Amino acid sequence: MVSLKNHAVWLMTGNNVRSTLEIARRSVRIRIDTRTDRPWLRNGFLHGDLLDWARRQRPRLVQACISLVLAWLDHGRPRWQGTQLGSFEEWSAVLGGILDVAGIPGFLQNIERTYANADIETEEWRALTNLWWERFANAPVKASDLHDLCLRNDLLAEVLGFGGMRSQVSRLGRALNRHVDRCFGDLQIVQERGVARSSARYVLKRHDS
């Protein structure tokens, strides 16, 4: 194991990029919508060759960035009060504070959408628990009770697999066991105590937001 200082900034581009949740929580997503099906044919830009312009203007661009930081220092280093990235709280507080002083809005405002796009399975479990609550509230249910909800609402297809009903119910039961005590929004999946595994029943608990 080697620990090294990281002085690199990683920038990636792609069309409709979908990352894993591990990458998403370490990323700041910037989405650009060109509103055209052939963006490479656009013209009339202020700076035609942007990379060449940026290389030639590097001193001015660096000076502008330093000016933003100095303005933040002059204002007493206010910390960002909005949403912060977990494990990167200090970075979020500083960079968000700099942008706030500069009057640049929108810092990390797309974070929930970024997480949703990165974790489709969690979004499906969230949808299932909402439907589960509407149908059964906090009454105990079996995996077979929830199987029909999944099929009728096209949820958790990868969890259920392509086997017969008994196989799908069994797979859903194992998935429920893995998600016991996990919260989806304000709903938590809890396993009923003192029941044999073959007839396990599950209950939703609603917590105040």
Image: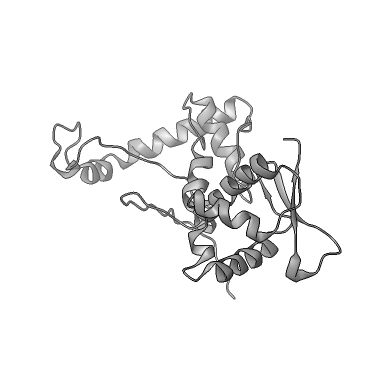
Q: Going by the image, does 2 lie left or right of 158?
A: right
Location of residue 205 by image quarter? top right
Q: Is residue 124 above or below residue 93?
A: below
Q: Residue furthest bottom?
A: 1
Number of labelled discs? Answer: 0
Q: Evaluate whether residue 25 shows in this view.
A: no
Q: Residue at x 49, y 38 (%)?
A: 110
Location of the N terminus (image quadrant): bottom right
Q: Residue at x 63, y 51 (%)?
A: 87
Q: Position of residue 121 (x, y in %)?
A: 53, 55
**In this view of the protein, which residue sits in the foreground, 56 or 170?**
170
Q: Is residue 95 above or below residue 183?
A: above
Location of the C terminus (image quadrant): top right
Q: Going by the image, does 11 lie left or right of 173?
A: left
**In this view of the protein, which residue sits in the foreground, 200 or 32?**
200
Q: Evaluate whether residue 126 shows in this view.
A: yes
Location of residue 178 by image quarter? bottom right
Q: Is residue 113 above or below residue 177?
A: above
Q: Position of residue 120 (x, y in %)?
A: 49, 53
Q: Going by the image, does 42 lie left or right of 70?
A: left
Q: Is residue 127 above or below residue 142?
A: above
Location of residue 146 by image quarter? bottom right
**In this view of the protein, which residue sits in the foreground, 149 or 58?**
149
Q: Position of residue 191 (x, y in %)?
A: 77, 58
